[in-house]
Image (cartoon, rainbow, N blue to C red):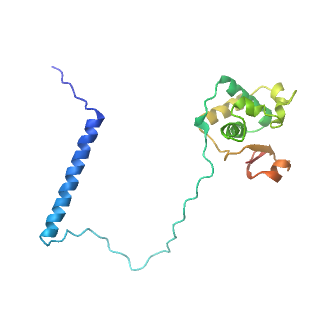
Amino acid sequence: MSRKIRIYPPVIVTALVALIFAVMAISSIVAEAEREAAGQQAPPLITLAQPTETPWPTAEPQPTPEPTYTSMIHSYDWDGEDERMLAKIAMAEAEGESVEGKALVILVVLNRVWSDEFPDSIEEVIFQKNQFSPVAEGGRYWTTEPDAGCYEALELVMGGWDESQGAFYFESTGRDGWHSQNLEFLFEFGGHKFYR
């Protein structure tokens, strides 16, 4: 004869656990009230001896700085055509860069998509006028094909990697143009400087 184990719904289990805790709390309160009525003191808590001197100086707690950037990677659902465009712009802008360097270019595009200051789709961001020079007629976007590093970069980003600090712009490290004079510099990585 087989035995069946009864599985109770979580609501019932939660209610029983809450009831047990409530009974224990009430018992504790009643016991404390009875001790006070009888003039008894509650049993002392165990205390550790306090040192008379602090063996080392204590630092005052510092407030935790508020994060200035929260990644939005998992809030956008892209399709195969979006992936192809991201890989192509990564190749066109960062062909000689590492996988992370290519991923940062992809993240700049995605940061713009998530921002209210730019268009709402990957295609519109990449082809927005005067934003990414390789998409101009005859530019590198049209003449190169993504390499394996571009697809590794895409997988890295899709897996949650985001070291972009919310960058919206980048330029080559050898240049000090409009970006460096008008935008907030964030960091330099590989052959690019990144701005917000």
Q: Is residue 113 left or right of residue 137?
A: left
Q: Can residue 191 be seen by looking at this rendering?
A: no
Quadrant of image for the N terminus: top left
Residue farthest along the front direction in this orientation: 116
- Place residue 85 in its image quadrant: top right
Indicate whether 155 appears above or below 47: above
Residue farthest along the top direction in this orientation: 1
Indicate whether 51 appears above or below 7: below
Q: How far across and how far down the image is residue 64, in percent?
A: 55, 59
Q: Is residue 137 left or right of residue 113?
A: right
Along the viewing direction, whichever of 61 and 95 lies nearer the viewer: 61
Residue farthest along the right direction in this orientation: 138
Q: How far across and how far down the image is residue 27, in percent?
A: 17, 56
Residue at 63% across / 52% down in the picture?
68
Residue at 63% across / 36% down in the picture?
157
Residue at 29% across / 36% down in the picture?
11
How many circles with numbers are drawn on the protein? 0
Q: How far across and how far down the image is residue 92, in percent?
A: 79, 32
Along the viewing direction, whichever of 138 and 76 lies nearer the viewer: 76
Q: Can residue 194 be seen by looking at this rendering?
A: yes
- Place residue 37 in its image quadrant: bottom left
Indicate whether 55 appears above or below 108: below
Along the viewing direction, whichever of 184 and 89 lies nearer the viewer: 184
Residue at 59% across / 36% down in the picture?
75
- Place residue 17 in its image quadrant: top left
